[in-house]
Amino acid sequence: MYAQLRCRLHNFLRKPRAQRYALPIVWPLLGLSRALVLLLPFRLLSKLLGAEHGPYPLSCLATPQQTRRALDIGRTVRWAACHTPWHSNCFAQALTARMLLGAAGIPCVTCFGLSRDVQKALIAHAWVTVGSIRVCGGDGLASYTVVGCFVTSGRKTP
């Protein structure tokens, strides 16, 4: 047990300083996002996501600085999601990333997609993009059909 704790501490200390400092903010935000996903209907959650754009994936313009910051936010959200005692699924991660990007004044697009698994059951997925990069939820997007996108401007939002 001591060796495992020591290994985790060593891995934590190897992370970039900004990522370590952001963890106390991101971790509770993931919990809040998960609670919102479980408790609120989507029509209320959609107000946090920005202006509805329909099922048309698009890209928003971002400066190179905003793109780098968005990549840092995405890395931190994905890293923190791996270490939560609750299930931080793609929707909770997308909602958290969207809140952090909005607080940083970075324009983003939050998309939702559907696919079918081998048993023909529907699978939903959420992801966030800034410019041409995927901040979070970018795995295997080619297999998903986009059913909705929400766009935010670069101004600071809650």
Image: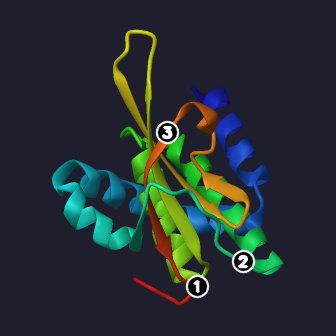
Q: Is residue 75 above or below residue 62?
A: above
The residue beneath circle 3 is: 145
Residue 104 percent across, percent down from the top left: 59, 81
- Image quarter of the N terminus: top right
Residue 134 percent across, percent down from the top left: 66, 54
Q: Residues within 10 Å of mark 3 (few under 14, many from 20)?
A: some
Badge 2 vs badge 1, beta-carbon distance below 8 Å:
yes
The residue furthest right is: 64
Badge 2 vs badge 3, beta-carbon distance below 8 Å:
no
Residue 27 seen in render: no
The residue furthest bottom is: 155
Q: Secondary structure at mark 1?
A: loop
Badge 1 vs badge 3, beta-carbon distance below 8 Å:
no
The residue beneath circle 1 is: 154
Q: Amino acid at mark 3?
A: Thr
The residue beneath circle 2 is: 62
- Image quarter of the C terminus: bottom left
Residue 108 percent across, percent down from the top left: 57, 70
Q: Is residue 123 above or below residue 53?
A: above
Residue at 26 percent across and 58 percent down: it is: 36
Residue 57 percent across, percent down from the top left: 56, 57
Q: Secondary structure at mark 3?
A: strand
Q: Amino acid at mark 1?
A: Gly
The residue furthest top is: 119
Residue at 72 percent across and 58 percent down: it is: 133
Query: Marks 2 and 3, how far apart in space?
Result: 25 Å
Q: Residues within 10 Å of mark 2 (few under 14, many from 20)?
A: some
